[in-house]
Image: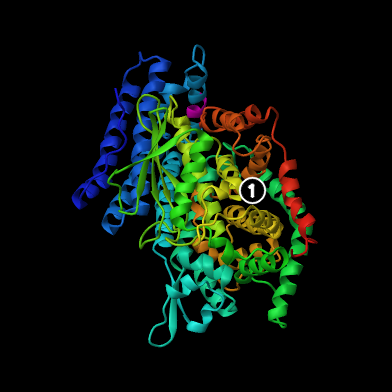
Amino acid sequence: MTIEPLSFPTDAAGWAAFAAERPTERIARVREIDARLTSEPDLSTVERLELWNDAEIALHEALSEAYVISEAHPDVAVRELAEEQVQAVESITSQRLLDRDLWAAFSARSADGLDQDQARLLEHLLRDFRRGGVHLPDAERERVRWLAERDTELSLTFSRNIRDGRREVAVPRAGLAGMPQDFVDAHPADDNGMVTLSTDYPDLMPVREYATDRATRHALIGAYNDLAWPENEAVLAELLEVRAERASLLGYEDWADFETETRMIGSGAEIRTFLARLDEASLDAAQTEYAMLRDRLRRDMPTAEEVTIADFWHLLSVVKAERFDVDPQVVRSYFPFERVLPGVLEVTGRLLQVQYEPVHAHAWHEDVRSHDVVRDGVRLGRIHLDLHPREGKFSHAACFPLAPGIAGRVVPEAALLCNFSRGLLEHDQVVTFFHEFGHLVHEILGGHQRFARFAGVQAEWDFVEAPSQLLEEWAWDPEVLASFTANADGEAIPAELVRKMRTADAFGRALEVRRQLGHANVSYRLHVSRPADLQAETERLYASSSPVRPLPGLHPYAGFGHLTGYGACYYTYQWSLVIARDLLTGFADGLMDETDALRYRRHILEPGGSQDAKDLVEGFLGRPYSFEAYREWLGESRAEFAVPRT
């Protein structure tokens, strides 16, 4: 029997029904399954696990579809319907883990006679029940249920405020000094000589890098750092309290301890240890880099006392152009979007031995490009690429699962929601594209599991960034880039320029780690300490993490979308990067080596969450992963400081 992918509606009424009725139907299916689990005592352990899996498939489908529609559909009414269903699905998910009758259906079951996948599912399931609070007295159990539902409600509100929080600033025409000509042409001045800029990425990213007018950079980045404020001030404050109380009732010291129990790092205390290690590894190089940026700023502004976050990317760009002969405007000329998109598809297709066949899937917006992922004539999954900004759409870049890949039952599907320019891309955006595509192929290739619990990107949460961070390396390879880039004259990006880009990229690396350290400290400390003054504490944490100063008096935490999904655990990005840098050593014969790529696919991507992440990595590398490749990568910046312009 042929398994078909999702079928999307073709009219407004159909989309409203898709957003509202499909999750409701799946919730009803779950309730029927739960009734069997709690009323049929003669069911075997294997039968119970299969029924639980049926319910999880239904919940995964309902939640994934609703999340994507809530973040991407152009009709606000449809988005609101989908948001309501997200909350309903999250609610039944937490309720099930508090259901003592469901717990009793599994709690006395032994793993004897189960195969490896079944035993793993039972172990995880019993752990989930405990973490859900099923063992608590009635009053506390009910309170935990309410707190879980309130967490979902607040998280959805937080994300919606960010999605709808687009800001605009007006600057004089002269404020576009230094901007590429195509950007200037696309931003004409009004009758008063003012130009409107938005916090959307196609404006924000070029301005922060190219604008030589410091006031313009400060105005736009300042607006971006106040995204969703004051709307999210009270939302976040309550969310932090809700999570702290929930963790306490469940017997954890704090929310960080609750979250890390199921992750590679193991405990909240280990977050502090890991962040201290990052601090030690990056401190000296970051101070040296900062001094160079400050000196360069003072050449233009002799009275400048400090480099701010609004200066950071611009100064990096200037220093790289002057010291390493890398002009970012020349670099971007080789990356028109309409060449980058097929380039990413072609490169990853060769690497993973798949083809991407365009299909007309009637997705939620005309911008969406859908493809079947095929190998040897067999459809492995379907991807949906929604890559340009629009009003009401998710405003960053991320991969969203759509359908959990279940062998023989459900075709894995996933979507990229990004905000790329339709014209020339910055190289950073190309790197981002490869990064998010790494999540996408992980979701598809890992989406052929027996149980929904292990389908796709379902390994420990602090591992899931590693495959996407690894794929970023392909955006720095001269041969890879030469295969799809072209400037206006049709010339591919020269290998020598890519070499210079790689050399220049090492400069500022330690400062970027410090910036990420700031995000991780904010994520962790806000959840653990729950300060009364979120603004003051966030500004203090960023200032203490990096010599690059935050803009004073702003509220970046209000637009920090990862505070919902990642919670206290933004350390994940650097933890995964440690692993990614080590995984790269497994490509000893080149990034496009077929043998290494096949081993990587089979050991890292295809198992999904069916094994512990440390075992996946050890299977690929032939040894446990280590910190050394990351330390060497970070140390490359020191070696490049003395490289003169050529």
Q: Main secondary structure of the magenta part?
A: helix
Position of residue 88 in the picture relative to residue 334 (left or right) = left
Residue 198 horizontal/vertical position (percent): 44, 70
Crowding near the residue tagged with mark 1, few <14, some 14–19, many ≥20 C-alpha atoms within 10 Å = many
Residue 390 horizontal/vertical position (percent): 37, 61
Helix, strand or loop under label 1 = helix
Give amino acid for label 1: Gln
Query: Does the rendering let one see residue 571?
Result: no
What residue is at 23 percent from the left and 45 percent from the top? Answer: 9
**Residue behind mark 1:** 574
Q: Nearer the viewer, residue 639 or 14?
A: 639
Query: Does the rendering let one see residue 339?
Result: yes
Position of residue 213 in the picture relative to residue 148 (left or right) = right
Which residues lie in the magenta part? 123-127
Q: Is residue 470 above or below residue 48?
A: below
Position of residue 280 in the picture relative to residue 311 (left or right) = right
